[in-house]
Image (tube, rainbow, N blue to C red):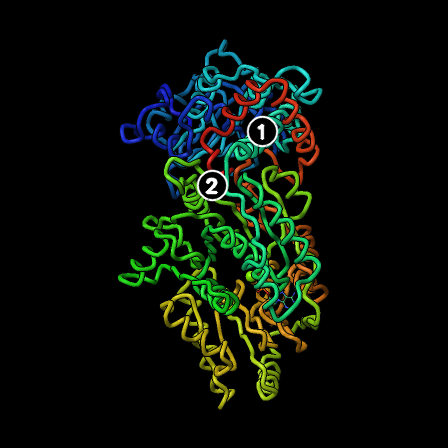
Amino acid sequence: MPRDQPAHDPAPARVATPAAKLSGPAKAMHKLGLKRDIDLALHLPMRYVDETRIAPIGGVRDGLSAQVQGRVLESRIEARGRRQLVVRLADDSGELVLRFLNFYPAQQKALAAGQLVRARGEVRAGFFGREMVHPECRAVTPDTPLPRALTPVYPSSAQLPQTYLRKAVASGLARAPLHELLPAGVVPAGLPPLREALRLLHQPGADQAVEALEDHSHPAWQRLKFEELLAQQISQLQAQAERATLAAPSLQPARDGLAVKLLAALPFRLTGAQQRVVAEIEADIARPIPMHRLLQGDVGSGKTVVAALAAAVAMDAGWQCALMAPTEILAEQHFRKLIQWLQPLGVTVAWLTGSRKGRARTAMVDQVASGEAMLVVGTHAVIQGDVAFARLGLAIVDEQHRFGVAQRLALRQKLEAQRPEPGGPALEPHLLMMSATPIPRTLAMSYYADLAVSTIDELPPGRTPIVTKLFADGKRLGVIDRIRDEVQRGRQVYWVCPLIEESEHLDLQNATATHAELSAALPGVGVGLLHGRMASAEKAAVMALFTAGEMKLLVATTVIEVGVDVPNASLMVIEHAERFGLAQLHQLRGRVGRGEVASVCVLLYATPLSPTGKARLQAMAETNDGFEIARRDLEIRGPGEFMGARQSGDALLRFADLTEDSGLLQQARAAAPMLMQQHPQAAAAHAARWLASRADFLKA
Ligand code: ADP
Ligand code: MG
């Protein structure tokens, strides 16, 4: 018998035992997250095998799988090269050999001559005649019943035999609290009750369409997906309702205050789109409930100044503001820009990052705690343990999708209500998130029920569109000539080195080699190197030289990906462009074309390029519109990959798929508010059942 068919199945342990005390399969089950009865009930088969029928041995065609039953005529060990167990099995219709390369003495005993045996496997023509190699099989008696349901095959691990898991799931399913929570009329017509759906998925009758079960289109699967989507919609609406009960400071611009002065002092006029989103944000933060808004706008659309204006309003109203960026480079750049804009207006901008330690940090933390520092810029160090704001009114998170889930949760906790006046009301800060990676609008609207979205859909005037060119790597020397020309015209250039997924070390080696190559090829041109392993002071020094124009060519790994702003840079070369995601290429390309000079982005690719690879790079050459690129990327690769599981929230959906199940999503969207209004207890119970352990992440 194969290893997953031990003669005596140990009874599955009850599942709430602490992991440390478990052994073998029970531990493996724990590892897979199968701890409670409900976890087991929701652990669904990947496929099914049909053991409900017995085929006559003589009638099974070669190459097909079947279950047969017969007497063992002979059982012997052959030592033909490798020891193997060879068992001849016969019924009235014919004869067959069962062959085992690995076997236990117990198996040999169970398959002794005269024994009645049931075996399932693929029949093929073999050395000994027609045979099954390593069939699933066991000894039976003439009245051993046949299963009435298809046999499920579950996702499992090497330490967890299917038979063990099947029994555990069956008993988990029987015990799990799966009573119907949803009143009639909520579930779309034609879908079975939950318990029935799960029973069917785990133990489908032999008459069920296996294909519909396996491709998840079966009504039982639809029921499960609907349940999940409904829970997700309810939890979003709950978060929204909860937020509506919270208080936040009402932040209103002062007459002749900072916001007005900043606007007047800017060297440019806001675009129409910027004015619109500023108005949306100002209206939101003037209300006494916390804002929860995403500001999305293509690379270079001017989100920073919008953030600065929002911060100015908060400070006008006497509240502190925190601006967080995912990298030190980006944080420092924001810091410089904000100093340039706000210092002349008398605002002290504080600076907090992970690399700032010791006395400087302590002093800064004190200023934040006393409320003296009105605007704090930095990396996630801003939200770390020892930092406590005196009166935080507005938190702004740039490139929010780059922050990990844990960081977003930490921020969430930091934003919990404060009581600025002793005995006064608890007030939560407003939250503004910014992103250049657009979430397709329909997705944003339907998925993030609790998120308001502002979109900057216009670039500042006077920008000459970036021209993108594709070159095979063989044209490298020509590209280097182009760099020389550009530098001679007083412009600056980025050279982005490829991602080497397997090894950060190779990444660095490669960047260093390219730096040496380009320094040698371009004598007299200041060539700098920037990579993720450098200390932040080093990085800052290199960035400062490049920003000041003293360094002309910057060789970098993708550390420059987000938000870097050097308007004099007019050429960007990206090596091995085929290895990057489109969203990332678009971000990188956005580092040029920030001034009025015509800019070029060169995508170098290794040949041969796959047809998809070519289509992707061509999309980059054909459009500069981030939303259009997102749309095409979605077409080529699907939403999960494009946005990253974290941002899309897809990781939180186990059964439903936002693109495939948009019909069910619409139904869940319609049902959720109705259910909450008419049956609030059922709604709450349903959300709790599905999202108990995930609620924090959904809100983050
Ligand atoms: P992003 O949206 O990618 O963060 P930034 O805020 O970095 O874009 O803005 C890109 C550049 O455009 C900056 O140099 C910024 O000062 C400038 N900018 C922003 N708004 C305008 C405007 N309305 N007119 C001209 N330049 C602008
Ligand atoms: Mg930016």
Tell me the number on the disc at residue 465: none
Residue that badge 2 annotates: 428
Whether residue 346 sits left or right of residue 199 in the image: it is left
Return the x and y of residue 79 as percentages of the image width and height. 37, 38
- Give whichever of 98, 324 is nearer the camera: 324
Q: Is residue 229 above or below residue 392?
A: above
Q: Residue at x 49, y 41 (%)?
A: 700
Whether residue 681 sits left or right of residue 365 in the image: it is right
Crowdedness near tag 1: few (<14), some (14–19) or many (≥20) residues, C-alpha within 10 Å: many
Q: Is residue 553 above or below residue 171?
A: below
Quadrant field for ligand 2: bottom right
Alpha-carbon span between mark 1 and mark 2:
23 Å
Res. 135 visible in picture: yes
The kind of residue on which mark 2 rests is: Glu
Residue that badge 1 annotates: 234
Q: Residue at x 49, y 23 (%)?
A: 41
Of marks 1 and 2, the one in the foreground:
2
- The answer to whether the residues at label 1 and label 2 have Cβ atoms under 8 Å apart is no
The kind of residue on which mark 1 rests is: Ile
Looking at the rendered structure, the number of numbered marks drawn on it comes to: 2
- Give whichever of 623, 499 is nearer the camera: 623
The answer to whether the beta carbon of the residue marked 2 is less than 8 Å from any atom of ligand 2 is no
Kind of element beneath mark 2: loop
Return the x and y of residue 543 as percentages of the image width and height. 46, 73
Kind of element beneath mark 1: helix
Return the x and y of residue 39 as percentages of the image width and height. 46, 26
Q: Is residue 10 above or below residue 504?
A: above
